[in-house]
Amino acid sequence: MTTELSPDALPELLERARKDYAALAARGLSLDLTRGKPAPAQLDLAEDLLSLPDGRHTAADGTDVRNYGGLQGLPELREIFADALQVPVTQLVALGNSSLELMHDCLVHALLGRVPGAESRWVDQERIAFLCPVPGYDRHFALCERFGIEMIPVPMTPDGPDMDEVERLAAGDAAVKGIWCVPKYSNPDGACYSDETVARLAAMSAAAPDFRIFWDNAYAVHHLTDEPVETADLLAACAASGNPDRVFVFGSSSKVTFAGSGVAFFGASPDNVRWLLANNAKRSIGPDKVNQLRHALFLRDAAGLRAHMARQRELLRPKFDAVQRILAAELGGTGLAEWTDPKGGYFVTLRVPDGCAKEVVRRASEAGIVLTPAGATHPYGDDPRDATIRIAPTFPVQDDLEQAMLGLTTCVRLVGYEKLSAS
């Protein structure tokens, strides 16, 4: 990111940015771009869920969904999501509404029990560490902090994490037990893992025999274009490479239907599935199968899932287009920012000059525009460059989003030109 301005131009640009910011602050806005939540219009697309299962209480195999049991979840719902998550139906588990909860539970089970291939419980080992591609998902990092798991940042590239660094760290340190991955339309960059990255993750050497890839495929069906990105099948690649137990696949319908009452999925090797179900049997007598039947009846099949997500895309594409249009119009050619243009997912990453992200977020907040805290995209909330800002365009209505983006670009110009003036 370079800024080429003549010394004579900078004072005028800074003065205009100050005037624009004063006008922005005077408007008394109250806008929120913090979290990647579905908008009410997206939730409305699944409103028919509330009238299902319409008196029906029997699954396709005759199971009475009102009763206990069925730890693995309804087969007909698993069939709908199996292709999208790249997991065979027999190795896919459908559970409650939160994939984050599933990730939490897998960590707890690994800490207090033994994952297949483990020599001991993780809690009994002196040090446990996870590789954390950055920028990444703050809730992954929060889970590590919650359980005292050391986080080792690894740079992200457009093709996934820096695999030279991942391979070096995984092979050289037996305390490294896992890596967080959002393989498609990653949070927050929108990066998609290349076939080479998937192959290297599957085949690489790991000093820990119980090394696990936490494959959070949260945006597997959340395309923003008519040409969906397809990632290679990591579960199959791990099996082919002689590491069948290496990956835990996570997904959910939370951003497909209702965020607060969707269905979460876990996919893995047969041994890993048995491990999870055995642990779950001690904490639950079965998931909410009524909600699972509701989803199966609403979505119907894999084609129905794709059609539903096409309707979602019609709502989201104009918002992401507006973000790109405003960033280009207001910051293009200034040298003050770079940003991603994702083909799917829920976020856009804005990169500002080093040392400016926190100040941009602070100025925006003072003007009534709330953003995700600077640093949230990095372990321990520490972005060493203080340059990354995550934009979440999905929830606001179009007009509010555009106002917020115009305000944000005003803050970037103000802080950027102030920094240049002081240098």
Image (spheres, rainbow, N blue to C red):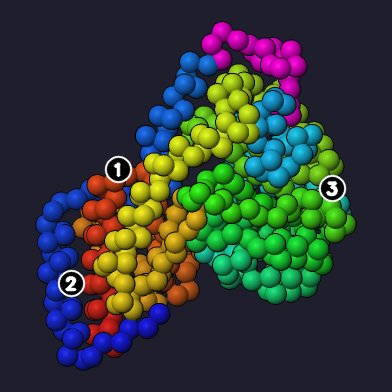
- What amino acid type should be assigned to the residue bearing mark 2? Ala
The Cα–Cα distance between marks 2 and 1, rounded to whole angstroms, is 26 Å
Front of the two marks 1 and 3? 1
Front of the two marks 3 and 2? 2
Contact, CB < 8 Å: mark 3 with mark 2? Answer: no
Which of the marked residues, 2 or 1, is nearer the chain's N terminus? 2
First to last magenta residue range: 53-73
Residue that extends furthest to the top in the rendered view of this protein = 55
- The residue pinned by badge 1 equals 397
Residue that extends furthest to the front in the rendered view of this protein = 226
- The residue pinned by badge 3 equals 116
Location of the C terminus (image quadrant)? bottom left
- The residue pinned by badge 2 equals 17
Position in image of residue 151 (x %, y %): 62, 63
Q: Is 54 colored magenta in this rendering?
A: yes
The Cα–Cα distance between marks 3 and 2, rounded to whole angstroms, is 58 Å
- At 30% from the left and 87% from the top, the residue drawn is 4
Mark 2, other Cα within 10 Å: few <14 / some 14–19 / many ≥20 = many
Position in image of residue 152 (x %, y %): 63, 67
Contact, CB < 8 Å: mark 1 with mark 3? Answer: no
Location of the N terminus (image quadrant)? bottom left
Say which of 257 and 213 sits in front.
257
Looking at the magenta stretch, what is its main secondary structure?
Answer: loop
